[in-house]
Image (cartoon, rainbow, N blue to C red):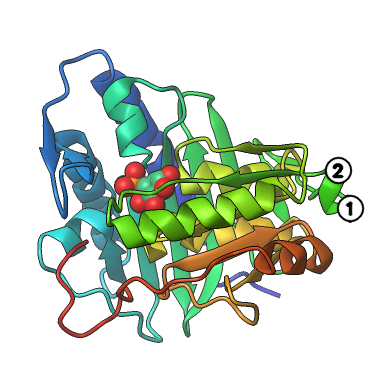
Amino acid sequence: MTDLWQNSMDHAVAAARRAGQVVQQALQDDRKVMTKSSSVDLVTQTDQRVEQLIIQSVKEKFPTHRFIGEESVAAGEPCVLTDDPTWIIDPIDGTTNFVHAFPFVAVSIGFSVNKQVEFGVVYSCLEDKMFTARRGRGAFCNGEPLQVSHQTDIKQSIIATEFGSSRDPEAVDKIFSSLRNVLCIPIHGVRGAGTAAVNMCLVASGCVEAYYETGIHVWDVAAGSLIVSEAGGVLMDTEGGEVDLMSRRIVAANNRTIAERIIREIDPFSPTRDDAPSKSSQ
Ligand SMILES: O=P([O-])([O-])O[C@@H]1[C@H](O)[C@H](O)[C@@H](O)[C@H](O)[C@H]1O
Ligand SMILES: [Mg+2]
Ligand SMILES: [Mg+2]
């Protein structure tokens, strides 16, 4: 069977690698920091430049494809997923890490057709780890197959999560109450790399049993979601049931037992959806 999207995926891998080189180079220079929805929602010229580099290179090769890019949406482009082939791009996942030179920064590229992710590429550029997944064909890190952890006992697990960039006290209260509940199950520990994409790759790699967060965006998790499921993991909504990548809520786990156990402890809330009609960037 011919593989319809292999050319696009090869292009994504090459684009992510080039983008990673730009990010690494930029770490040597002064980084001018700007803000978006709040004083802790950071962006740099490197985020914008890398996104444009990726989009331009794709447009030259695949002129009919569409885009959802974090910085394009911040600049007013729509965030709508259609059935058309769509590149879902987070040029720097972990911008706060990048600003502080905290060494986990990723370029994340998901590709969806008929609203289904066909491939995902996450390049953790400071670790030089290229995570890839193609629907139905497994997940890999630098070409080596990935497999989630086999653990089913939550008490023997490590869980990844993040505080995100909302400082709304009600949201922060929910985040803390969930974290307290999960920690006190009790679990072995809580971790967070400062990038949703890398956290999901850690689930796929079997280093942590699960990752959950409310407040992420579709570009943070599109690629990682396929990498987790192709490594044998599951994706769920924070209230149970199927994940909706536009809903800004995700649980990515090694298996359903662990996912459902965490969901019991999460105090859920619903930020404005990514595809809400009159949504300004937040
Ligand atoms: O802004 P960005 O660095 O691309 O992405 C953020 C990172 O993934 C962070 O770990 C997560 O907690 C936030 O929810 C994301 O928005
Ligand atoms: Mg991100
Ligand atoms: Mg980003």
Q: Quadrant of residue 30?
A: top left
- For the point 70% across and 61% down, the residue is 262
Q: Can you tell me whether the CB of the residue at mark 1 lies under 8 Å from the nearest atom of ligand 1?
A: no
Residue 60 screen position, x and y as percent: 24, 58
Q: Which residue is mark 1?
A: 153
Left or right: residue 189 versus residue 82 is: right
Q: Quick check: 180 left or right of 78?
A: right
Q: Is residue 29 visible?
A: yes
x%, y% of residue 243? Answer: 57, 76
As helix, strand or loop, the secondary structure at mark 1 comes to: loop
Q: Could you say which quadrant of the image residue 192 lies in?
A: top right
What residue do we see at 64% from left, 39% from top? Answer: 190
Image quarter in which the N terminus is found: bottom right
Q: What residue do we see at 21% from left, 41% from top? A: 42
Is 190 placed above or below 239 here?
above
Tags 1 and 2 in contact by the CB under 8 Å rule? Answer: yes
Residue at image position (42%, 75%) is: 247
Hey, which quadrant is residue 102 in on the image? top left
Q: Furthest-top residue in view?
A: 28
The circle on residue 245 is none
Could you classify mark 1 by the number of other residues whose Cα lies within 10 Å: few (under 14), some (14-19), or many (20 or more)? few
The residue tagged 2 is: 156
Residue 226 location in percent, x, y? 61, 62
Residue type beneath disc 1: Asp
Name the secondary structure under disc 2: helix
Q: Spatial distance from mark 1 to mark 2, Cα to Cα?
A: 6 Å
**In the rendered image of this protein, does residue 65 appear above or below residue 219?**
below
The amino acid at mark 2 is Gln
- Depth check: give the residue in front, 224 or 50: 224
